[in-house]
Amino acid sequence: MCRLFGMTTGGPRVRATFWLLDSPQSLHAQSRRMPDGTGLGWFSLGDEPVRDRAPIAAYENADFASAARNVVSHTFVSHVRYASTGAISVHNAHPFDMRDRLFAHNGVVQGLDVLDSWLTDVDRALMEGQTDSEMIFAYITAEIRRAGDTTAGLIAAISRIAAELPVYALNILLAEPRRLWALRYPHHNELWVLHPALGGFGQRHLASGHEPGSLDVAGANGATIPAYVIASEPMSDDPDWRLLEPGELLIVDGLEATSHFPFDDPAHPLSTEDLSAAEAVSQA
C-alpha cells in the first residue's frame, strides 16, 4: 500500500527531516516496502508548488534525502509508491501538481474509462502520467474550478466518484499554501493525524539533529513550531496519533482543523476479491 505524508505549520517554514528520514517509521524506512516511486512536494517562498520525484525507492534516492534535509516550507506532501496502475516512471510518481495545488493518493478506483469521459481536453492537458490517482486529481481540479471553492469542489468530485464508480479506497492529501485536506474513504486503508495541541511530535522534531523542543527552523535555533502531521501509519511512538474515522474529511487551515463527514458509503464498493492481482498486492 502506498504511503502518504502531509504536514503544515500554518505559516512558519520548517524542515521535515525527522518525519522523512529519521523517525521510527519515516518515509525513508517505509520505502523499503514501497519501491516504485518517491516524491516530495512543498511550497516555495512565493508559495508556488515545487516537486522532487523519482521512479525509485526513497531509501535509494539521494535527491530525496538531500531535499528532506534542506528544504524549508510551511506545508509538505510526500509519497512512496507501490504501483497498481501506470508504469514505474517519474510522471507517475506522486505528488501531482495542478493549478497550484499538490495531491497524493492511496487506494484503488476502477472504471477509469468512465472517469476519463468526465474530463475535457483542457482537464487532460494537466496530466503527465497514466495513473488512476492523477486522473482523480484532474477531475477534482475540474470540480474545484467549477465550484470556485476547494472544499466544495473536492466534495462534489468525491461524491460523484463514490456514487458512480467502483471504489476500494480513496485516501487523499490535497495541499494549498498553509492548508491541507486529508480524506480517509471509506475504511479499508488507514490515515492518521497528530494534533499539535496534544504535546506530541507535532510540536517537536520538525528537523533532525536536535533534542525535543530545540529546533532549527529556517536557520533560527531554539524555536518550537507546532504543526499538524498526517500519515498512512503512525510514524513515531507518540501516543497521540489519532486514526481518522471512515469517511472523515479533515481540513487544516493554518492551525485550525475541522472534521467533516459529507460522503455516503460507496454505491459500488470493492472488496479485496474484486481487485486485480496487481491492485491486491499494492493494497496489502
Image: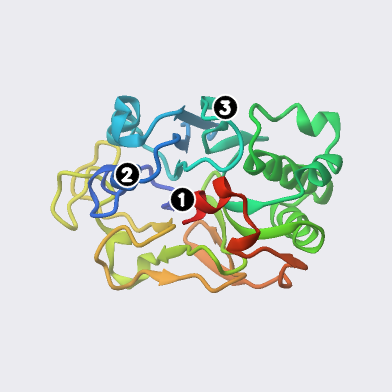
Residue at 51% across, 30% down? 88
Mark 3 vs mark 2, CA separation in Å: 21 Å
Q: Position of residue 246 (x, y in %)?
A: 58, 72
Helix, strand or loop at disc 1?
strand
Disc nearer the start of the sequence (3/1): 1
Mark 2–mark 1 distance (CA, rounded to whole Å): 11 Å
Q: Which mark is residue 20?
A: 2
Which of the two marks, 3 or 2, is nearer to us in this view? 3
Say left or right for 91 vs 44: right
Q: Which structural element holds mark 3?
A: helix
> Which corner quadrant of the image does residue 49 belong to?
top right
Return the disc, 3 or 2, that comes first in the chain's sequence.
2
**In the image, residue 45 above or below residue 116:** above
Disc 1: which residue:
4
User: Between residues 43 and 170, which one lies in front from this camera angle?
Assistant: 170
How dense is the environment of label 2, judged by Cα within 10 Å: few (below 14), some, or many (20 and up)? many
How far apart are the alpha carbons under marks 3 and 1? 17 Å
- What amino acid does circle 2 point to? Leu
Quadrant position of residue 131: top right
Residue type at tag 3: His
